[in-house]
Image (cartoon, grey):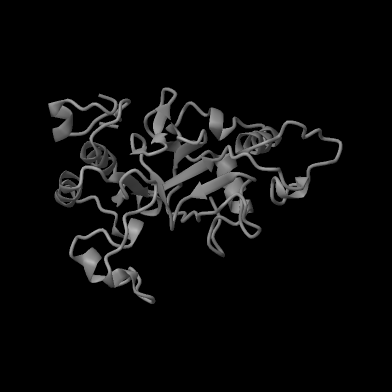
Amino acid sequence: MAHELDVSPSDRERPGSPPVVAPRSVDLARWCASRGWPVHPLAPGRKTPTANCERCRQPGHTHKGCACIQAGRWCHGFHAATLDFARIEQWWFNHPGLGVGVACGPAHLVVIDIDAHRQQPPDRDRLLPGIPIPRSVDLGGLANGFHTLGVLAALRGAVSPADDETTLRVRTPSGGLHVWYRAHGSHRWQCSAGSSSTRALAWQVDVRANGGYIVAPGTTTVAGTYTAVGPAREPAALPDWLARELARTGHLPPRASPT
């Protein structure tokens, strides 16, 4: 993040460590791209991509073969993500209020998105899909994704990603946490929502991977700034135990499995 998001002139020529104070968006975008993470603009003050042009908003229009993307415009969200520094500078110098999103798939990232929403927990058989939790286990106090992920990690004898100081972790304005990992080899991990009945890792734990994006650390929205926490400023390799859990819960395409 471009000083730890406050970059020196030399850093602007060759981005180094991530910023800790809010950086200029163009510096943040260049810092991400220098790590091989394709970036795309987010709407000013928001965590969602910038709107498509009028033509691209029409029903039936998709990113495939879109002339806007081919011409270097930002329609279709993460599908327009780029590593091209000239394009990055054009976008963010001309529109400094834009936020920065990272396309997870082409960046070979798997981000564990832990939520802390105030919600009534579901029945215990929906807390950890595929893992029955005996009635003898006291779940009093379980209230959010930090807790369900902690239970999953404890069952596997592992450190919860929320406490993994070896990898980049980013506090969200809502009190959640994004835990960034490098994906294994050619595995195309899939996205999921923790509330999904078809594919989920744990209640209130989303997965951002192929087909999704993540807000870059240092990005500021009306709700606050996405802030890196802990000592690590780079994603570590996806832990083996977590890769197995993602595969078990359907986060790989059919007929694919981790080695």
Residue that protrudes farthest toward the front in the picture? 222
Q: Is residue 130 left or right of residue 217?
A: right
Residue at image position (49%, 40%) is 238
- Whether 259 is drawn above or below 167: the answer is below
122 vs 183, nearest the viewer? 122
Q: Which quadrant of the rendered structure holds the N terminus?
A: top left
Please tell me in which quadrant of the rendered image residue 79 appears.
Answer: bottom left
**Residue positioned most to the right:** 136
- The residue lying at 28 percent from left, 69 percent from top is 54
Q: Tell me the residue at 45%/40% (across/down).
A: 181
Residue 118: where, in percent of width, then height?
Answer: 62, 39
Quick check: 211 left or right of 128? left
- Percent across and percent down for residue 167 are 45, 31
- Occupied quadrant, residue 28: top left
**Looking at the picture, does residue 125 appear above or below residue 11?**
below
In the rendered view, does 201 fall on the left or right side of 9? right
Could you tell me residue 139's position as x and y percent?
77, 35
Counting labels gives 0
Q: Residue furthest bottom?
A: 60
Residue 33 in the image: above or below residue 161: below
State the residue at coordinates (23%, 66%).
68
Q: Quadrant of residue 224?
A: top left
